[in-house]
Image: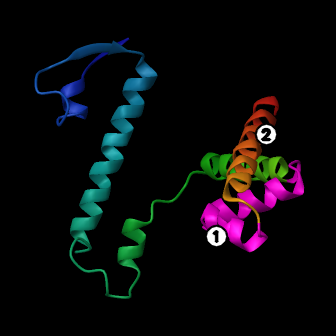
Amino acid sequence: MTKINLRKYYPNFYTADCIIEVPDEIAALMDSYEHAEAAYYLRRYRHNAYYSLDRGDGIERDITFVSLSPCEIYERKVTIEQLHTAMAALPDKQAKRIYAHYFLGMSKSAIAKAEKVNESAVRDAIERGLRNIERFLKNV
């Protein structure tokens, strides 16, 4: 177990020292995040990427784009696949209404006008569809 000062990691939240014991893995992880952030600020400073976003040489994109680890990429892929499977398991109307509202950004009233139905029917279908997706994902 390692003792850490939370004030060091959260200076805006802790105004006084707050020392706690955490497992060694957690302390190492927090230190690695601190080192990564310091390296990011140093790279940003060295490449003068803190003031210019229009140079076109890719420095700003490299600085602002935080690459994902292979584990995070895999988790996103699995999550997206599970979401698509859950959407495919829904009844057709629920799936279309959820897709229109969340993926296409249509309002519930616009969906109701397009389908020539009452807005409450669209609202209920979306809520039931989300509950069905939640049940499906809990079982997976």
| Residue 104 seen by the camera | no
The image shows residue 51, relative to residue 7, as above or below, that is: below
Contact flag, marks 2 and 1 (Cβ < 8 Å): no
Q: Amino acid at mark 1?
A: Ala
Image label count: 2
Disc 2 marks which residue? 132
Q: Is 21 one of the magenta-colored residues?
A: no
Amino acid tagged 2: Asn
* Quarter of the figure with the N terminus: top left
Q: Residue 90 appears at what percent x and percent y?
A: 86, 49
Sequence-first disc among 2 and 1: 1
Magenta residues, start to end? 88-116
Residue at x 38%, y 86% (from the top left corner): 57
Res 17 quadrant in image: top left
Left or right: residue 10 versus residue 102 is left
Secondary element at tag 2: helix
Residue underneath mark 1: 110
